[in-house]
Image: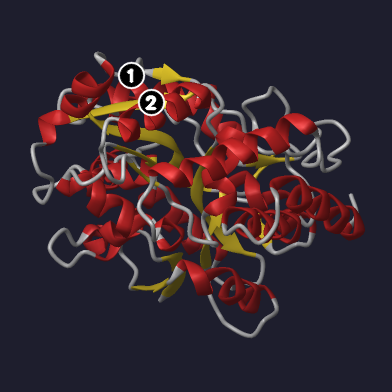
Amino acid sequence: MLKVLAVADPAVKVYVDENLNLLKDFPETIDFNVVPWSQYYTTMLDVFAGKADYDVIMVAGHLWLADFAEKGYLAPIELEEEDILPVILQEMKYKNKYYLSPSFCDGHMIVYRKSILKEKLGKIFDSVITPEEYVDAASKISSSGTTGAIAMKAHPSEIFTDALPFLRMGGKDVYDTETLEAMCSEESIIKGLEAYCGLRNYAFPDTDTYGNEEIALTIQNGTAAMAVTWSGQLGVVYNEDCVDKKDLGFSTFNTAWNVTWSFAISGGSKNKEKANELLRFLRSPKIDAIAGAHSGAPVRRQSYLEGKDNFPWYECQLSMIEKAKPLPNMLLAGDKNGVLYEEIAEAFGGRKTPAKAMADAKKRIDQIGI
């Protein structure tokens, strides 16, 4: 038996869906344990500490790869490149070794109601827009009397990556790609956070409690004119519960970020050969096409080509994946990014000014080290 630790995400539920029964053709018994996002990181660290026994774990792509590979938490894997998107293949590597096997992509996608934008703005979004255009649209829709023009995924566990396109709007990123130094106290990033916090004026009052499920619901029932969500949520959004699916439009940011949630083999696994076979099975063209249809974010080019007529966001999303800017591979990324989640939540909640929050974040991250 192989044991798998996975994050509780709609994109992951496809693997344990009893009706689809995707694992039935794999010759080994699979114990697939799905853990809520709020508990996932600590549960995963228990595996690495030898407190829990798993052969395969899910890893948030380049966000965690450098740290985990350097510490020996992950075993190198066998990966046939085939038609997996080149940018995803690059993310699977660390120091010229493959450690990750791609499952689905989570990148910034904008979903909006075409009818509302046409009525309020006189046009719909282009396939790629700037954060400034998004802010301007939210302001105009709200000023026309629309309550809750947007929904924001501003729960404290989501807020850093939700804010990231806006932090980047001035042309700088939160980390220097060469030195890995935190740049979050730069003026352009502070202005980006001010813009993001200002969006709260156009959002539902409880938007700071919104995660994936709440965002999906507001898109599906049409209560929000637009929202930013993860590409790995679009298959769930665009299901039979969605009101007037043809009214949905899709766009992305020119400052978008993407991460590829992936399967990895635990360094402590005693079943590495069989675990490699499982990873090969899970990323096969057949499974990618089925799982990708449910998540909305496959990893193979052929899945996009074959599914583009059924999934209207595929063309825009493929462009997003290929052009999105990753965060740098760095050690202690979880600790450093955790500071940004906390400080951005403080600013969004009005407990600190954006300038104060980013200055505090810079100080705290510098204390963690490079």
Q: Within the image, what quadrant is residue 351 found in?
A: bottom right
Find residue 84 and report its horizontal and vertical position in percent: 44, 31
The answer to whether residue 280 of the structure is visible from this angle is yes
- Decide if residue 282 is on the left or right side of residue 17: right
Residue 116 percent coordinates (x, y)? 20, 28
Residue at image position (59%, 73%) is 270
Q: Is residue 300 visible?
A: no
Report the amino acid beneath label 2: Ala
The numbered dot on residue 125 is 1
At which x and y percent is residue 271? 54, 69
Horizontal side, residue 360 vs residue 339: left or right: right
Q: Quadrant of residue 44?
A: bottom right
Front-lying residue, 187 or 279: 187
Q: Does residue 208 appear left or right of residue 236 in this picture?
A: right
Task: Compare marks 1 and 2 and give the one earlier in the sequence.
Answer: 1
Q: Residue at x 91, y 59 (%)?
A: 367
Q: Is residue 366 above or below residue 254?
A: below
**Element under label 1?**
loop
- CA neighbours of label 1 inside 10 A, class few (<14), some (14 to 19), many (20+): many
Identify the colour scheme used. Answer: secondary structure
Q: Which residue is mark 2?
A: 137
Quarter-of-image position of residue 178: top right
Please give the name of the residue rendered at 57% of the width and 36% of the height, measured from the top-left corner. Answer: 195
Q: Secondary structure at mark 2?
A: helix
- In the image, 207 versus 46, the foreground residue is 207
Q: Position of residue 70 (x, y in %)?
A: 79, 55
Residue 216 vs 120, above or below: the answer is below
Q: Is 125 placed above or below 103 here?
A: above
The residue sitting at 62% across, 39% down in the picture is: 194
Q: Are marks 1 and 2 in contact (CB under 8 Å)?
A: yes
